[in-house]
Image (cartoon, helix red, strand yellow):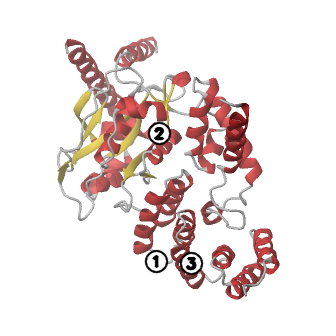
Amino acid sequence: MSTSFFRLISRLLIVCLIGLPFQVNAGMIGTDSVVSAAQAQVARNAVASFISRTDVAGQLQALGLTPESAKERVAALTDAEVAKLAGQIDSLPAGAKSSTGWAVLLLVLLGILIYWSVKK
Amino acid sequence: MSRRTARQARVRAGFFLAAALASILGLGGCISLPQTEALRAKPPAGLPLRVELTEVPFHSQDLEFLCGPAALATVISAAGVPATIESIAPLVYLPGREGSLQAEMLGATRRSGLVAYTLAPQLEAVLQEVAAGTPVVVLVNLTLSPIWLFPVWHYAVVVGYDLERERIVARSGPIKREDISFGLFEFLWQDSDHWSMVALPPGRVPATAREPEFAAAVAALEQAGRQAEARESYRALLARWPDNLVGLIGLGNVEYTLKDMAAAERAFRRASEAQPQSAIAFNNLAHVLALLGRLADAESAARTAVALGGPTLPEARKTLEAILASPAKP
């Protein structure tokens, strides 16, 4: 296939990538500004929001996601959720266990408790 | 199959141990369970004594770490959207943490086209949702150690309760019907600050809906790109709270994105009448009217938006300038 075809596709892709994040046209004000006003937060700063989203997507990648997957997953979160995740991904609860291990853990803790109370 | 049985036995043993430890500690008077006490002292009026949503599907968690996807697949398929652990895991499971984050549980629900709504941190709210037919995802810490020592976070799905026997029934990991006491549940649940969520089909208002929180939950679905689903839920929100500003603006924005300009105009006009102090309502109305070619009406709405000022004043000024600059129709 000709290079001009690829050039056209590349240009289309660039336009799509730049244009896609803006779902509501310039001139329209998005619902999120009403939500953040209702929640009495500081006025939403589009630049700050963009930076923390990029930041969180980067952290998700570091934790094993592909770049596309990280981007899609961050896009499904609200600004407030992204702000909470930023810098805290390593410490926030991550529900995981089914079963194995934790019964053993309890036994160990019970042992410590008994040891502690006897020693006391 | 024998492995499954063995795992179930381990979980049961774990819950038994947890119960034993809790009662030991409880005898020492170290534990206070205010929510259980409150339910015992004053059972909520109008709540059925006993409910079990037996029709809620069971997605058995056969692999370690996948309780997030298992719990989500359970509530998402109960809400009518086909889901399996395999289809949900890529939306929520985080390999580096070997688990799933609360925020992403909400995000993955939205990506499935459902409203993700976080309940008030009350056992009573969980019971009310279950009584209304909605299974509830809860986050618990399975260890009885201080939270900073060894938290073992786990998602389960509450599908039933019994007020008289004070029991909760949950789909949990590989166990289809985990039956534990209110007290033990409250104890395991408190470390997550009593976190719980529901996944709602479009157009459904939760039984315990609080106006601002539910409006924000629908707006989050819109922001996640599920416009058609958000439209139905905005309509349901407005049927309950006709003057909700997030609902009025959100409905207009969704209609606009879905390119139904007549419906967008109706929504923004209704917003500007119900909330005449909202500059956003007038700004967006002006924008839609300009697109419909009604420049005189558009200009008047834009002037109102500018006069109202507020944090969106720069956008309102831009809208007015654009309308004044556009050539008049013949």
| Camera-side residue of A40 and B17 | A40
- Label 1 to label 2, Cα distance in Å? 34 Å
Residue kind at label 1, given as amino acid type: Pro
Number of numbered discs present? 3
Tell me the residue at 31%/49% (across/down).
B79
Q: For marks 3 and 1, give the CA distance.
A: 17 Å
Question: At 56% from the left edge and 33% from the top edge, which residue is drawn?
Answer: A69
Cα gap from disc 2 to disc 3, whole angstroms: 43 Å
Which amino acid is tagged 3? Glu
Q: Considering depth in this image, is B298 or B75 the residue closer to the camera?
A: B298
Lower sequence index among marks 1 and 2: 2
Tell me: residue A82, above or below residue A108: below
Name the image quarter holding residue B289: bottom right
> Do the numbered discs 1 and 2 sit on residues whose CB atoms are within 8 Å?
no
- Dot 3: few (<14), some (14–19), or many (≥20) neighbours within 10 Å? many
**For this rendering, which residue is in front, B142 or B254?**
B254
Q: Label 3: chain?
A: B
Horizontal and vertical percent for residue A62?
64, 24
Q: Are marks 2 and 3 in contact (CB under 8 Å)?
A: no
Secondary structure under the numbered disc 2 in the rendered image:
helix
**Which numbered disc covers residue B265?**
3
User: Residue B132 in the image: x percent, y percent?
Assistant: 26, 57
Looking at the rendered image, the disc whose residue lies closer to the viewer, 1 or 2, is 1
The amino acid sitting under disc 2 is Ser
Residue position for label 2: B192
Q: Is residue B195 visible?
A: no
As helix, strand or loop, the secondary structure at mark 1 comes to loop
The residue pinned by badge 1 equals B242
Q: Of the residues under marks 2 and 3, which one precedes in the sequence?
A: 2
Of the residues tagged 2 and 3, which is closer to the observer?
Answer: 3
Q: Residue at x 26, y 44 (%)?
A: B159
Give the crowd class for mark 2: few <14, some 14-19, many >=20 residues within 10 Å: some
